[in-house]
Image (spheres, helix red, strand yellow):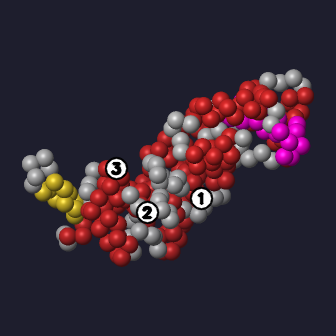
Amino acid sequence: MHAGSRCVESDVRGKHKWHPWTVDENARLRRLATGYENRSIDWLAIGGELGKSSIACRVKYHQNQELGIADPSQGHVDATNQEVQRQLSQGHQIDWAQVSQAVGLDVLKCLEICQVDNGKARWTFDPNTFSWEMADWMKAFIADNYPAPATPNFRAASNYMWINRDDCIHMSNLLQGNIVWTDEIKARVVDMRSKGMQFKDIGKQLSPNLSAAKVVAMYHGLQQPPHSRLSPETKRLVRAFVDENAERCTYHELLQLAKVQF
């Protein structure tokens, strides 16, 4: 085995041990490094995640890039799609281990590149039927395969759960307490509020994790003209938000959080 497939680590006695890179470690290395996108890659943090030195991780990543290991070929994509289609045509639940064996890539890579979408279920939020079981399933998959700061691959999550990709993205945002205030949703909030519904209950109708404070802020924003002074209630919410976050955030971070919150 050539030197590029091994890395050097120092043990507590100052000696060096040679540890071969496994297929899974190569895949995790690529996911962690690409998760930084345009930011400077923190090789020390990646080394800590993988239990290897920062130098070994950086060298191995660039070696993989040069060898073309980082990205699958179109042939791999086609082979993955064909194997998945074959299993679906036989009425089988997709066996990703079998797909991996047929294609010659690790399971996660097959999940990331599979482009087959036929027969996928839809996943929309319904407060009357919502179950945390599916939500926890997706959260566990992302946490196991795309630990922060890596960016989750929702194509992989979609294929793993066999659920529409856009629905996975939408539900992930809702689970984080984020919501896009469309005109339709704003109208629903106004309607529910006019019927005497509490803000916390309105939030539960829109998302499993939407705080009452966000609903209140949006609602009061609708009740006053643009550029008007803040209402006493909104002022109270802003003060509470600043008091809660001022100690742990920089000024810039606090402004960004406030934009999301209010």
Q: Earlier in the sequence, mark 1 or mark 3?
A: 3
Q: Position of residue 12 (x, y in %)?
A: 13, 47
Query: Which amino acid does the dot numbered 1 rest on?
Result: Ser
Image depth: mark 2 or mark 1 in front: 2
Vertically, is 128 above or below 27? above
38 to the left or right of 1: right
Magenta run includes residue 223 = yes
Q: Earlier in the sequence, mark 3 or mark 2?
A: 2
Residue nearest the viewer, comparing 210 with 241: 241
Secondary structure under tag 3 reads helix
| Dots 3, 2 in contact, CB < 8 A | no
Judging by the rendered image, the residue that carries numbered circle 2 is: 40
User: Can you tell which quarter of the image residue 245 is in?
Assistant: top right
Specify the segment rendered in magenta: 209-229
Residue at (12, 57) in percent of width and height: 16
| Whole-number angstrom distance, CA of label 3 to CA of label 2 | 17 Å
Q: Report the residue at 65% width, 38% height from top.
A: 177
Residue hosting label 1: 89
- Disc 2/disc 1 C-alpha distance (Å): 45 Å
Q: Which mark is residue 49?
A: 3
Residue 39 is one of the magenta-drawn residues:
no
Please tell me which of labels 2 and 1 falls first in the chain. 2
**Looking at the rendering, which quadrant does residue 103 occupy?**
bottom left
Numbered disc 1: secondary structure: helix
Neighbour class for label 3 at 10 Å: few (<14), some, many (≥20)? some
Image quadrant where one finds the C terminus: top right
Identity of the residue drawn at 32% across and 72% down: 63
Amino acid type, label 2: Ser
Looking at the image, which residue is at 62% across and 35% down? 242
Q: Nearer the viewer, residue 49 or 224?
A: 224
